[in-house]
Amino acid sequence: MIQSLGLPAKEHPELYNISDPDAITGIHSQYLGAGADVVTANTLGAYDFTFGDELEGIVRAAFANAKTAVLKCGSKDKLTALDMGPTGRLIEPYGDFTFDEIYETYKKTAVLGESCGADLAIIETMGDIYEMKIAALAVKENTGLPFLCSVSVNVNGRTMMGNDLTAFLAAAEGLGAAALGINCVASLEDCKRFVKVLLGYASLPVLVQPNAGLPEMAGSRAVYKMEPGEFAEAMAQMRRDGAQLLGGCCGTTPGHISAMVGMCENIPAKPTVKNNFTIASNSRKAFIFGDKPVTVGERINPANNRALTEAIKSGDFDYLEELAAEQIDDGADIIDVNVFVPGTDEKENMESAVEALINCPVPLQFDSASPEVLEAAVRRYNGKAVINSVNGSAESMAEILPLAKRYGALVVGMTLDEGGIPEKAEGRLEIAERIARAAAEYGIDMKELFIDPICLPMANDPEAWDETVRAAGLIKEKLGVKVMIGLSNVSFGLADRETANKKYFKEALAAGIDAVICNPAYTNLCNSNR
């Protein structure tokens, strides 16, 4: 739309907020006249990287133009959105910009947008869910704005950085987006397919803002040849499929929006379906907990591991990659990461571990007794992690559960408290119920919570395993949550730990335990139903 007014190829469109405010106001007015409920301020690339000291004036002018158009249209129900796209910078380790630098950039624009009267923020056209995560944190930690998250994907349903749609969905839902969706795709047929993927897993309203086909270049201008009628028909189909927020991206003129409104306004919105999937993810793909048992590899833990202890002390975090790869080869679905070594800085260790494991092909579970260390891990992790763990003490719940909520991590609750570990299953159930109540108070869905009824060594108490299994059954029956156990504790003190771990692993599966933390090399041979 701005190109049609003469925008030169290399000029930033955000400058038109100041140089030609009437033109920008006029564009907003055309979309409002076409039936749009939300107009996005002309701020897609409004960041300090590009505009420096001019940034504030550009954002304020952008909202003045949008608000003027809304006022002129005469409706009090129209909204103005802060539009936030990619910064165009690559983040470490793939580029030279740090998490904190990108965060501060998004923070400045988000704070400005809210101060100018934005009703919401749209984090869109994202090609990297890590950058989307940083933008979302900047919005939620520094403003009161609701935010929507949207990605651009190729014909395979992946972003530029290779993130798939379920990994995006897991991250966006966990971060607290009000809605999630797609904008900019290769074709409307692709868009229809991808919207169905999101609708199949999402528990949030789904947003769809496709472009009017792929552009063709006419000199220095991008030209989109898709007719409004073709666009509207595809949008109507996605509306019938369940998409609730409809809009247009590249090349969609007021004519496209008008045709869409006319064809879709009488199609009733389907209610949002709360899907009950438990999802962890790495940067590229999601892991969905389902019918098969889950193995969490335990070997990245310096306790009783001299080689790992020495590697951490010497700063050799490449060794963690080797341990992760070996466990994945042995069948691990998730890798537990514990880097506590006395005499070292555990937070620095964890940050180094997260960086070293950035390309780990399965999700990570972070294990620490320190809330500060856990936050350092889940904040910088490019995916939806698991926090291991919280316990039933008031202090632990107050420190750990807010972290799980803020960063959208799954969390493991251990059935111990200030009084220790109850001997009987009923006592462990009581602690589990306390953790579940506290989690719900913090807004954590039960599908995001695991309970660990705690394996005690059989060498000390021959009935310990039976009580753990009984506790697991009670917890699943009463609370409906998933159960995860640290299996290796059960064989501590026994002569043949490998044989014992295999035996109890089989029994754990038979008891319906959902996830087992163990050395996968000891269990993969007997886990033939994985």
Image: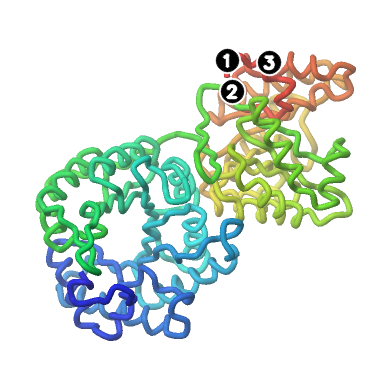
Q: Which label belongs to residue 293?
A: 2
From mark 3 to mark 2, how far is it between C-alphas? 14 Å
Residue 59: in sight, yes or no?
Answer: yes
Residue 135 left/right relative to 116: right
Q: Residue at x 43, y 51 (%)?
A: 160
Label 3–label 1 contact, CB within 8 A:
no
Vertical arrangement, residue 407 with respect to residue 83, above or below: above
In this view, the mark in front (3 or 1): 3
Amino acid type at circle 3 is Leu
Q: Which picture quadrant has residue 490?
A: top right
Residue 24 left/right relative to 323: left
From mark 2 to mark 1, how far is it between C-alphas? 8 Å
Q: Residue at x 50, y 65 (%)?
A: 89
Vertical arrangement, residue 207 with respect to residue 65, above or below: above
Residue 137 left/right relative to 301: left
Q: Residue at x 29, y 47 (%)?
A: 186
Residue 474 x, y percent position in the rendering: 62, 23
Q: Which label belongs to residue 525?
A: 3
In this view, the mark in front (3 or 2): 3
Residue with the mark numbered 1: 529
| Quadrant for the N terminus in the image | bottom left
Marks 2 and 1, the one that precedes in the sequence: 2
